[in-house]
Image (cartoon, grey):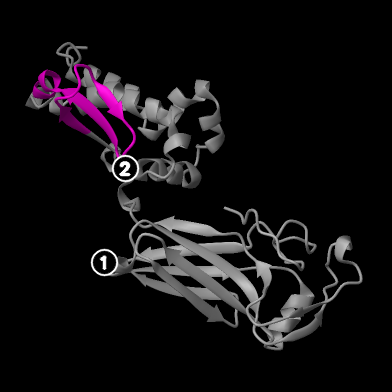
């Protein structure tokens, strides 16, 4: 995620082409470790600008990381002299998305600030910078604390099947935090039969696959739901996936099958293994 719609009355490295060269692709890297009590974020920043680096070394500027959680009203700012942050956030302090914004900001008054990398639009200009002003704006990033990332492979992490008295046909509800497959009462009673519930391969290749395909076709309208964040996370972090597939309706059925680890192959293998003639062959 990048900073958007921000304009300051002086050039900032990281905003458009205010200062060249622009930030490298790996300007922000972070790793997460978590235990039962805390999330720990290890954040490393990178930029290539000698004038700003000199200000940091002379203690006129410093690295800052602001992080917040809108649902719990948590908001903090951590300051470092090096481009490295270790941020520990208690699990009970957050619920949902944690936003991170990292900067190099002014620590002490800087008079007549100029930079050899200024865009030509600022040629010959200098600026008086007061404490708190931003020199470098790194790309924003976030973490969704309400997602169980250790269980994303299971369809149950973003989907559930339940009974509905309001529908006469199977209905997919994607407005909530899970994709819900709503079965009419008569269907749900059949679904609860142990023989049906135990046939996961059939359920995945029919109900679950159909619901997921429908959800993927409408994911942009529901991108703030937990199920959408879960799917986006898998697409962004697992090999073989691309968000570009969501833009092409013809590719969505294949994407859904890969997200479910090829339910058709599992169905066919189940039928072969269960076939009474298989052992004779």
Q: Quadrant of residue 32?
A: bottom left
In the figure, 281 relative to 115: above or below? above
Q: Mark yes or no: residue 191 visible.
A: yes
Q: Any mark on residue 219, and which?
A: none
Residue denoted by label 1: 36
Q: Mark yes or no: residue 269 visible.
A: no
Q: Is residue 81 left or right of residue 129?
A: left
Q: Are marks 1 and 2 in contact (CB under 8 Å)?
A: no
**Horizontal and vertical percent position of residue 159:** 28, 36
Q: Quadrant of the C terminus?
A: top left
The residue drawn where x is 53% and y is 72% is: 65
Q: Earlier in the sequence, mark 1 or mark 2?
A: 1
Q: Nearer the viewer, residue 155 or 59?
A: 59
The residue drawn where x is 45% and y is 27% is: 217
In the figure, 173 relative to 239: above or below? above
Residue located farthest toward the right when viewing the structure as drawn: 124
The residue drawn where x is 39% and y is 30% is: 215
Range of residues picked out in magenta: 161-189
Q: Quadrant of residue 95?
A: bottom left
Q: Nearer the viewer, mark 1 or mark 2?
A: 2
Q: Residues within 10 Å of mark 2 (few under 14, many from 20)?
A: some
**Horizontal and vertical percent position of residue 100:** 50, 64
Q: Secondary structure at mark 1?
A: loop
Q: Secondary structure at mark 2?
A: loop
In the figure, 54 relative to 88: above or below? below
Q: Is residue 216 left or right of residue 103?
A: left
Any magenta on residue 18?
A: no
Residue denoted by label 2: 177
In the figure, 61 relative to 179: above or below? below
**Horizontal and vertical percent position of residue 45:** 60, 69
Residue located farthest toward the front when viewing the structure as drawn: 9
């Amino acid at each position: 995620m990048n900073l958007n719609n921000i304009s300051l009355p002086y050039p900032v490295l990281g905003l458009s082409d205010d200062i060249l060269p622009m930030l490298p692709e790996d300007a922000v890297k972070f790793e997460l470790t978590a235990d039962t009590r805390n999330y720990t974020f290890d954040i490393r920043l990178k930029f290539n600008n000698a004038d700003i680096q000199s200000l940091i070394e002379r203690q006129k500027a410093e690295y800052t990381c602001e992080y917040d959680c809108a649902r719990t009203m948590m908001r903090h700012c951590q300051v470092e002299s090096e481009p490295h942050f270790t941020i520990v956030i208690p699990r009970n302090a957050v619920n949902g998305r944690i936003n991170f914004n990292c900067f190099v900001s002014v620590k002490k008054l800087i008079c007549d600030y100029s930079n050899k990398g200024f865009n030509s639009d600022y040629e010959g200009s200098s600026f008086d910078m007061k404490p708190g002003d931003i020199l470098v704006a790194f790309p924003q990033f976030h973490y969704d604390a309400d997602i169980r990332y250790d269980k994303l492979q299971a369809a149950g992490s973003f989907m559930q099947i339940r009974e509905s008295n309001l529908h006469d046909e199977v209905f997919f509800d994607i407005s909530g935090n899970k994709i819900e497959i709503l079965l009419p009462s008569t269907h749900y009673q059949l679904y609860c039969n142990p023989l049906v519930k135990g046939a996961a391969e059939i359920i995945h290749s029919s109900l679950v696959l159909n619901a997921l395909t429908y959800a993927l076709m409408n994911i942009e309208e529901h991108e703030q739901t937990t199920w959408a964040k879960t799917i986006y996370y898998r697409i962004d972090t697992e090999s073989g996936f691309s968000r570009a597939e969501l833009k092409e309706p013809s590719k969505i059925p294949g994407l859904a099958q890969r997200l479910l680890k090829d339910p058709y192959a599992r169905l066919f293998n189940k039928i072969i293994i269960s076939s009474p003639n298989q052992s004779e062959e």
